[in-house]
Amino acid sequence: MRNKFELASSGNASTSDVILPEGIEVQYALWNFDKGGYLQDLLHDLKYNRLTGIGTDMGKALANQFRKHHTVDPGSTILLPVPLHPAKFRKRGYNQAFYIALGMKKIMGIPIVKPADVIRIKNTKTQTGFSLEKRRENINKAFEIRNPEAITGKTCIIVDDVFTTGATTFELAGELINVGAGKIMITTVAQA
């Protein structure tokens, strides 16, 4: 199945072909990831320096652009920040994807799934520098749906900071599909 990968840059959407797994309708990124650039610095501050307001602001920008290209019904849609493993959450103190989702919620009026409903059960190593195959192996069976009723029949918008190979979001999407999710959409601040 061929879908479009969409990249909005400075408010203008451009598309290029990408192959998405069956069941994923769209993968949408707001900006290109610029290694060594300002965006990388902002994402690093969000992820490691507790500057969560950056995530909320990025989520608002992401939602504003996403809405220009996709229509969703807030009553049958949920936002799902990619879960962190509890050990990583305790160490960091927060989930950066949650703050991006929070910004999206403020613009779109879509609820965020409760953290206990979808959890990360595998404490994976950071994926940075891994090949696609190593990423898939690292993330395999990492997520568990604890409350299928929160997912079944819903349009699920997976939210994360950076989309690289898709290994993480595709693995999560597979679990959502297994419990009967409706449409699956992936949104990220950046595409590496």
Image: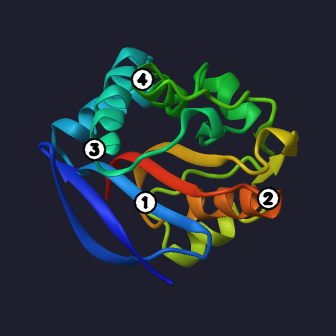
Q: Position of residue 176 (x, y in %)?
A: 73, 56
Whether residues under marks 2 and 3 lie with C-beta atoms below 8 angstroms apart, the answer is no
Whether residues under marks 3 and 1 lie with C-beta atoms below 8 angstroms apart, the answer is no
Q: From the viewer's perspective, is 112 left or right of 69?
A: right
In front of the other: 189 or 23? 23
Kindly identify which numbered label has been placed on residue 27: 1
Residue beneath disc 3: 68
Label 3 environment density (alpha carbons within 10 Å; few <14, some 14–19, many ≥20): few
Q: Earlier in the sequence, mark 2 or mark 1?
A: 1
Label 1 environment density (alpha carbons within 10 Å; few <14, some 14–19, many ≥20): many
- In the rendered image, which quarter contains the C terminus? bottom left
Kindly identify which numbered label has been placed on residue 103: 4
Q: What amino acid is found at the position of numbered circle 1 in the picture?
A: Gln
Q: What amino acid is found at the position of numbered circle 3 in the picture?
A: Lys
Q: Earlier in the sequence, mark 4 or mark 1?
A: 1
The kind of secondary structure element at disc 1 is: strand
Q: Is residue 34 visible?
A: no
Q: What amino acid is found at the position of numbered circle 2 in the picture?
A: Gly
Instruction: Determine the CA span between mark 2 and mark 3.
Output: 27 Å
Residue under the point 42% across and 56% down = 163
Instruction: Determine the CA span between mark 4 and mark 2.
Output: 27 Å
Residue under the point 32% across and 22% down = 57
In front of the other: 120 or 11? 11
Viewer-nearest of discs 3 and 1: 3
Kindly identify which numbered label has been placed on residue 160: none
Instruction: Determine the CA span between mark 4 and mark 1.
Output: 18 Å
Residue beneath disc 2: 180
Residue under the point 59% across and 22% down = 94
Viewer-nearest of discs 4 and 3: 3
The kind of secondary structure element at disc 4 is: helix
